[in-house]
Structures are given as C-alpha cells and as structure tokens.
Amino acid sequence: RKQMIYFLLFKEFFKIGVLSFGGGFATLPFLYHIAETYHWYSINELTQMLAIASITPGPVGLNMATYAGIKTHGLFTAGLASCAIILPSLFIVIGISKLLKKFSDNFFVKSAIYGLKPASCALIASVALRLIKTSITGIYELLLFGGLLFIFLTQKKSPIFYLIISGLIGLILKVMAKV
C-alpha cells in the first residue's frame, strides 16, 4: 500500500515537472488535479500551501511539491516529491543545453516556445479564477481582494507587500473575531 502511494506520488510530481512550463504557478492546475483525484490534501490546504510556498525561499513549484509531500506522508514523501518535480527539468536542461546551440535559430523551435507562453498564461489564469472562487468566502475576503487588486492596478509593488498586508489583515480579523 505505501509503495503504491510512493509510486503514485513520484509519478504525479514527475508529470508536473515534465508538463508545467511557465514557472511554479504553472504547477497549480496539476496540484488541483492531485487534490481532486487522490485527496492527499484539500483544495483549501492547496491555497494555504500556495501562500506558504510563495513566501518561502526557492522555486514555488519545488516548495509546493515539498509541502504536498509532507502533507501526504511526511519527510520521505516530501523528498520523493521534490526529487520527482526536479528530475524532468534536470534532464531537459541537460538535453536542451546540448541542442540549443545547434537549433537556436530554428523556426519550429522558436514557434513552439512562442506557443507555450500563452498556454502557460491560460493555465495560470484558470487557477487564479479557482483560487478566487475558493478563497473568497465572505464580505471581508471580498473587500480585501478588491482593495489589494486596486492597489496592484494603481501602484506596482512587490508581491511580498501584498502577502504581508494580506497576512496582517487576516491576523487582525481572526483576533477581532475571537474578541
């Protein structure tokens, strides 16, 4: 039973490593799929994992894999998921570095990379809509989202600013709810 979970965990995170072009946030549709298919963590826990992975050092995708592995079955599976998500990139970078010089001006290579960019944006946008849908559960969350969105659109600040402000406001609201 445990060996099957280890195999599935490795397979799923290896697949994420192969298919998630566009950075760490491109892993989110796959992580949603894992949550819905295997129930190793809930959608709510996934949003919490995203918040933690975004503020911790390192690539978001790797942080998400590590956290999902810990949530699934502890430290061993955290290492397994982390290795699984890194291995495809390692193999791809080694392979591409050898071929890039040879094919860097190839029309088909340039076209494929050009086509991957909007696909990655669409995947990230679909996840953003899902996150909004699952995260905004009341008027306070809606007001916080609206306020931060307004600030984001009018003043370009670091993502860390928004995470810190959101965390502080969430902490204040939790403390006020207990009083």
Image (cartoon, helix red, strand yellow):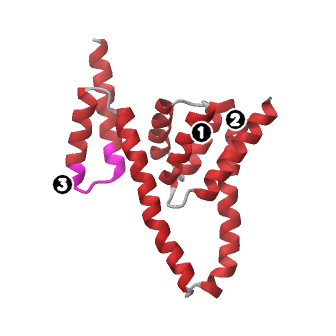
Classify residue 5 as left or right of residue 137: right
Q: Which mark is residue 75?
A: 2
At x 21%, y 34%, the residue is 143
Dot 2 or dot 1: first in sequence order is 1
Screen quadrant of the C terminus: top left
Toward which corner of the image does residue 93 lie, by quadrant?
A: bottom right
C-alpha gap between disc 2 and disc 3: 42 Å
Residue kind at label 2, given as amino acid type = Leu
Which residue is painted at 31% across and 44% down in the image? 162
Point out the stretch of residues depicted in magenta.
151-162
Q: Residue at x 56, y 56 (%)?
A: 20
Estimate the x, y position of residue 136 in percent, counting from the top left.
32, 32
Q: Is mark 3 on a helix, strand or loop?
A: helix
Task: Please name the residue that numbered disc 3 is placed on.
Answer: 154
Q: What residue type is labelled 3?
A: Thr
In this rendering, the label closer to the viewer, 2 or 3: 3
Q: Can you identify the residue that label 1 sits on?
A: 34
Q: Which of marks 2 and 1 is in front?
A: 1
Q: Quadrant of residue 41?
A: top right
